[in-house]
Image (cartoon, rainbow, N blue to C red):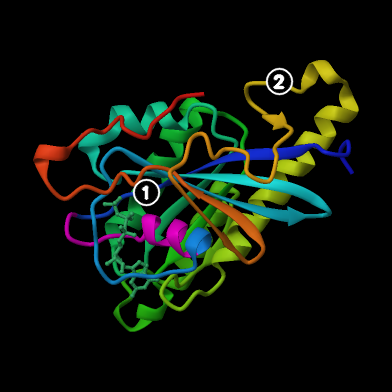
Amino acid sequence: MLEEDMKVAVKVVAVGNGVIGIILGKSSMIQRYCKGIFTKDYEKTIGVDFLQRQIQVNNEDIRLMLWDTAGQDEFDAITKACYRGAQACVLVFSTTDRESFEAISSWREKVVAEVADIPIVLVLNKTDLLDDSCIKNEEAEALAKKLKLRFYRTSVKKDLHVSEVFKYLSEKHLQKLKQQIAEGPESVHSSSNKIGVFSASGGSHLGQNSSTLHGGDVINLRPNKQRTKKNRNAFSSCSMP
Ligand SMILES: Nc1nc2c(ncn2[C@@H]2O[C@H](COP(=O)(O)OP(=O)(O)OP(=O)(O)O)[C@@H](O)[C@H]2O)c(=O)[nH]1
């Protein structure tokens, strides 16, 4: 156990891209996990978006701060800035989009260039569409093995294995943190491993809406999904650590 009253905050970034018109489901995954909802509508992520959820892992309170990054190259500079300070990463590709699979290594490199040595998982989403799959199972597994990443197959639509992804990342982060604490306080870098004390309503100074799901706090920061060019403000919810 960490000290009593201590809660761990983990910044997780969801990353990946496919061809225009075929979308991976990063935003949907985060929404599913934090709000328990799935929508068929697609709204392009402009820059970055943010949701959070509090869970318990190994008797520790973990606040997961889930950063949803835009899959489009035009937002590269902003999304890269958001990788900084990340403590875990979800690399997403889609069953129905071969390009998203082929792009995984380069997305991983982009993340690692900003933050080395963080837990990363590889996630194949839309497994409910296996009939339309353009990636062989063995290929996906070989990629995970080559990149030494834990591999998950999810269907955000059917709510399959989404929670496992975030639970695993939390466990890995916690493990790392405990190891650093055991090694001495100076190894716990306050900017890269935010250990802090949060009240039940903590973080609400940042958010506009909050609700509770599965017994955890969910604080929804300003939605950053925008439909019109007129309203575009890529920085509106991007606060760098
Ligand atoms: N069939 C199916 N559709 C899904 C699944 N997950 C997401 N989708 C759909 O795919 C689209 C994905 O949208 P987003 O979640 O916004 O995708 P994204 O990866 O965040 O896209 P960008 O914002 O452009 O980066 C939506 O129409 C979802 O309904 C899934 O598991 N199965």
In the foreground, 112 or 219? 219
Is residue 31 found left or right of 186 in the rendered image? left
- In primary-sequence order, the first of circles 1 and 2 is 1
In the foreground, 9 or 132? 9
Give the vertical position of 84 relative to 25 (above or below): above
Label 1 residue SS: loop
Q: CA distance from mark 1 to mark 2?
A: 28 Å
Report the residue at 45% width, 24% height from top: 240
> Percent from the top left, x then y, of residue 232?
18, 37
Report the residue at 39% width, 55% height from top: 26
In the foreground, 110 or 211? 211
Q: What's the magenta region?
A: 20-32
In the image, is residue 22 part of the stretch drawn in magenta?
Answer: yes
Is residue 129 found left or right of 72 in the rendered image? right
> Percent from the top left, x then y, of residue 105?
42, 44
Location of residue 130 (image quadrant) = bottom left
> Percent from the top left, x then y, of residue 162?
54, 65
According to the picture, the residue beneath numbered tag 1 turns out to be 16
The residue at the far bottom in this view is 131
According to the picture, the residue beneath numbered tag 2 turns out to be 189
In the foreground, 109 or 145? 109
Closer to the camera: disc 1 or disc 2? Answer: 2
